[in-house]
Structure formats: structure tokens, C-alpha cells
């Protein structure tokens, strides 16, 4: 089973219902913090999904290193420097090439303040062709997407999650239309895809409403959740607009939206 909890359904400009990126993805019981943008830790604890706070965080995935997707890395590491957390096994960070260098730059600023006190920090740079095995037989596979990285990371990633039963959830990350996303999304049980802007505010490296609709019409996922909505997009009925292209179920996420694969009608 895959549980996709959207802690932040917005872009870099927060609103009361759409804060910057943050996702808590659980695959067959293993939970992953993905793209911890500003306020991610607070929203995770408030969600009730991490009753032990940072001690419930084992693995962190990054799609890219823009601030709205990674700003809470420093608060996470600073919290782990405190004597309060008790967990002692490694905390694992995965992300695109450039992640290790980014950590070194942060250490130049914060020094030992961001060194976990009890836990070893394991940093692994990944890219297309890598499969991350998850507990219980599931996996996470990164794929390259079209979102410009000109300073900290060499490229941006999306992720394809599978559970042991073969159910799939695909996360686009930040991207413009691209062949890699088309391929990953095709036939997915759940597609969590950015829908950043209305068409008249099209921005390179991001998806507009019609681009998301065209992607869904081609890829035919079983269910779609729209995320990374900037305020002009969040103010629209995005599900209806995407529905003009695609006749499957489309959900406009807000902070706190949760999606299950497979769907349990009793939830």
C-alpha cells in the first residue's frame, strides 16, 4: 500500500491552504519525508503522522534544491543536534548530484550546529537508473525532469514509487512537460503532479493547467492529485479545468490532503 500525505500543496508563495512543498510518503509501512520545504517539520508533527517528532524521520528524498523544497533541512539537522532525540540509527538523505556539496556549504555556515548528535548522516546522490529498495519489497526510482538547476544541483528529479504488490505512485517534482514524466506517469495508479500556474502565467520549468491536462490525457493515470499550486492557480477550480482534457478522477490538493493506493472505500 502507498499513502501519499501532502503536507504542502503550494509553491514558493504560501497561502493559508497551500504552503510550500512537503510530502510524507509511506510505502508498505516505511515512511519517507520528501522535499521538506519551509515549515515542513511543523506540519508533519501537526499531522499526527510523526508522534515521535524527528525520531520518526529515517529517509529524506529531494527532487531538487530550490529553497521551497529543501529549506527545512537545516531545522531538521539542528533538531537532531539537540540531546532530545533518542534514535541512533543513520538518517539517510537522497537527492540529485550537488546534494553533498550543498551540505558542505551549509556546514560552512552552521558548523557543528547541524551535525546530528546521536545519528550518522548518510548522504547519497542519485539519478536516473537508480532503484532505492524500501522495506517490505517496495522501491523508489528517480527520473530526470525539466526544471532548471543552475547553482546547487545538476538536474531535478521526479520519483516513481512501487509497493510490494505492484501498485504505483508517481511524483512529478517541479517540471515542465517532458518525455521522462510522460513515461513515468503512463498507467500510474496515482499521479501527484505540479500544476503551478494558469496558462496565461506560464513559467518555464513548471506545468500549466492545459499542460497537466494534456499529460493526463496521454498517460491515463488511474487518479490524479494536483499540487505545487501558486496562488493564481490555487484560486481556480483546477480539477474541473484539467477535467476538460482528462475524464479520470482529478483532485485539487490542499495542505493535509491524503491519497491511498489502492483506494480503500472505508477510509
Image: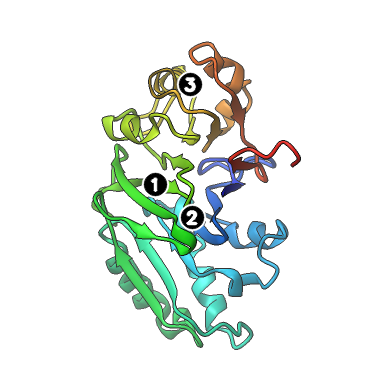
Identify the disc placed on residue 159. 1
Residue topped by disc 3: 209
Dot 2 alpha-carbon crowd within 10 angstroms: few under 14, some 14 to 19, many 20 or more: many
Does the CB distance between marks 2 and 1 fall below 8 Å? yes
Which mark is nearer the camera, 1 or 3? Answer: 1
Q: Nearer the viewer, mark 3 or mark 2?
A: 2
Is residue 249 toward the left or the right of residue 165 in the image? right
Q: Could you tell me which secondary element the residue under label 3 belongs to?
A: helix
C-alpha distance separating marks 1 and 3: 21 Å
Is 145 placed left or right of 74 in the picture?
left
Question: What residue is rendered at 38% in x and 50% in y?
Answer: 63
Tell me the SS state at disc 1.
Answer: strand
Work out whether 137 lies above or below 146. Answer: below
Q: Residue at x 54, y 51 (%)?
A: 23
**First of labels 1, 3 by sequence position:** 1
**Residue 119 percent location from the top left of the image:** 47, 83
Q: Nearer the viewer, residue 118 or 109?
A: 118
Q: Height in image: 211 above or below 1?
A: above
Q: Which mark is residue 34?
A: 2
Residue lying at the far top in this picture: please name it. 244
| Horizontal and vertical percent position of residue 107 | 37, 77
| N-terminal label among 3 and 2 | 2
Amino acid at each position: 500500500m502507498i499513502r501519499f500525505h501532502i503536507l504542502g500543496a503550494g509553491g514558493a508563495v504560501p497561502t493559508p491552504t497551500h504552503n510550500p512543498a512537503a510530502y510524507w510518503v509511506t510505502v508498505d509501512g516505511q515512511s519517507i519525508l520528501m522535499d521538506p520545504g519551509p515549515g515542513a517539520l511543523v506540519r508533519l508533527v501537526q499531522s499526527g503522522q510523526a508522534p515521535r517528532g524527528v525520531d520518526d524521520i529515517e529517509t529524506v528524498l529531494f527532487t531538487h534544491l530550490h529553497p521551497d523544497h529543501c529549506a527545512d533541512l537545516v531545522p531538521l539537522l539542528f533538531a537532531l543536534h539537540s540531546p532530545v532525540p533518542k534514535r541512533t540509527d543513520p538518517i539517510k538523505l537522497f537527492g540529485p548530484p550537488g546534494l553533498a556539496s550543498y551540505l558542505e556549504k551549509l556546514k560552512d555556515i552552521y558548523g557543528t550546529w547541524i551535525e546530528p548528535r546521536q545519528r550518522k548522516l548518510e548522504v547519497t546522490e542519485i539519478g536516473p537508473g537508480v532503484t532505492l529498495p524500501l522495506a517490505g519489497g517496495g522501491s523508489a526510482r528517480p527520473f530526470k525532469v525539466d526544471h532548471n538547476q543552475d547553482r546547487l544541483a545538476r538536474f531535478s528529479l521526479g520519483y516513481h514509487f512501487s509497493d510490494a504488490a505492484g501498485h504505483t505512485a508517481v511524483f512529478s517534482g517541479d517540471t515542465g512537460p517532458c518525455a521522462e514524466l510522460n513515461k513515468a506517469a503512463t498507467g500510474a495508479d496515482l499521479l501527484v503532479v505540479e500544476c503551478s500556474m494558469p496558462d496565461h502565467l506560464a513559467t518555464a520549468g513548471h506545468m500549466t493547467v492545459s499542460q497537466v491536462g494534456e499529460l493526463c490525457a496521454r498517460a491515463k493515470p488511474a487518479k490524479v492529485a494536483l499540487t505545487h499550486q501558486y496562488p493564481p492557480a490555487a484560486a481556480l477550480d483546477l480539477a474541473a479545468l484539467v477535467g476538460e482534457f482528462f475524464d479520470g478522477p482529478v483532485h485539487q490538493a490542499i495542505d493535509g490532503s491524503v491519497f491511498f493506493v489502492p483506494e480503500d472505500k472505508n477510509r
